[in-house]
Image (spheres, rainbow, N blue to C red):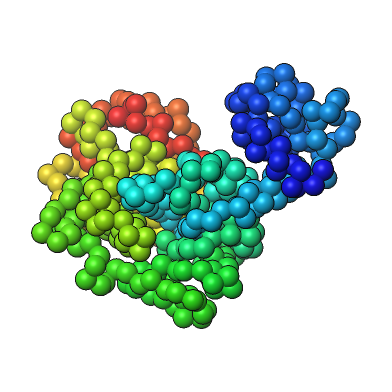
Amino acid sequence: MSISELYAKFKNSSGISTDTRKIEPGSIFFALKGDKFNANEFAAQALEAGAGLAVIDQAEFAADERFIVVEDVLKTLQDLANFHRKTFAFPVIGLTGSNGKTTNKELLSGVLSKKYVVYATKGNLNNHIGVPLTLLSIKDDCEMAVVEMGANHQKEIEMLCNICEPTHGFITNVGKAHLEGFGGVEGVKKGKGELFDFLSHHHGTVFINDKNPVLLDMASTRSFDKIVYYGSDDHTLKLEHESPRISFTKGDKTYFSHLSGYYNFENMQTAFAVGLHFEVPEEDACEAIAGYNPDNNRSQIIEQGSNSLFMDAYNANPSSMAASLKNFINLETSKQKVVILGDMFELGEYSDHEHAELGRLVAEGNFGLVVLYGENMKHALVHLPQAYYFTDKFSLHNWLEDKKIENACILIKGSRGVGLESVVRFL
């Protein structure tokens, strides 16, 4: 079956399903494979649950005409998504970066939604499966799309760009994330720069924070049809306070946000600049930015009893750890400051050094209490002889429950695989 024929069936379906536990009646089930599963084996189950068709790549599982056999299910999903993308006449904004991708996506989609019907990446569906699913979720009423793209090795952003074909785009920042896969910071720079490469070659528009020297340098080595600079011009937002929560002004009006830290103010500036480019009224854009309240363990501030929890436990790398810690160090409060930090993953040969450097930065903060969790955090102890260190969750949870921390500001941050949000109920 050709992609155009499959697309006709897709347009008559209720959408795409990839999980037999979440089958939409009349959907097309794509039997994806993973390291530990082969969904070809569950295609019949998907049909029984209500799917109209099942796309598989192992013919022995095809029992009747409802099974569509292809060479590679994942490639077919990606090709179908790109076929759908080519029908769009509206702007597609692609974004990537080492840190802040999801926050940028949420802020920007909120701003653009003040004027347009916007479809954006849900959650963090930003990889080789998530991007196609994002595109295929876009309906005919869409006026603007915001597509988040993540990567942990070179050529991945290039591949995702070829699927979603962004017309506009920006890189949030370039830092020490996924060093193992990218092969160091220069590798990260090259990998994230693949978005710039695509926009350069396809006459796209690029948004660049002109206060970010790395992004300016990356842009200077490429030619673009249009660059929109922001950050230091008269049209941007003005920072009033960055801690504990950001307040900013536009004109003679002050807005109070739910986010903390200068790095999040930069995210706000980006959303405002892109919104301004697409003629979203300034006041509407500011209200959308101020109204965004994260609920995904990213940059959350949670008042719990006498404690203020600064929850940034969705993910971590050396750059985001440094930004969060510096913001926390500068936090003005009469409460005791406590940090609970977990391992940073995907650093490869850089792991020992980066965890040791993290320990050095934490030591400079003179925090009232330092709690470390994870095998890699032992390297941070070189600079933190007074820290409490745990390698298993059970002991960590018990200790926190017994400790009964009170009247404190508590920063909680670690990589996704650490799942450090589990400590909240023991505080």
* Residue 415 coordinates in the image, percent (x, y): 47, 45
* Residue 417 coordinates in the image, percent (x, y): 52, 41
Residue pictured at 23% horizontal, 33% vertical = 303
- Against 286, is 124 above or below? above
Q: Nearer the viewer, residue 417 or 151?
A: 151
Question: Is residue 277 in sight in this rendering?
Answer: yes
* Residue 258 coordinates in the image, percent (x, y): 25, 44
Name the residue furthest top. Answer: 48
- Against 386, is 170 above or below? below
Position of the N terminus by quadrant: top right
- Against 211, is 86 above or below? above
Residue pictured at 12% horizontal, 44% vertical = 334
Give the image quarter of residue 394.
top left
Q: Is 112 placed left or right of 79 in the picture?
A: left
* Residue 10 coordinates in the image, percent (x, y): 67, 38
Q: Is 96 placed left or right of 333 in the picture?
A: right
Residue pictured at 79% horizontal, 28% vertical = 66
Question: Is residue 370 in sight in this rendering?
Answer: no
Position of the C terminus by quadrant: top left
Residue pictured at 21% horizontal, 71% vertical = 234
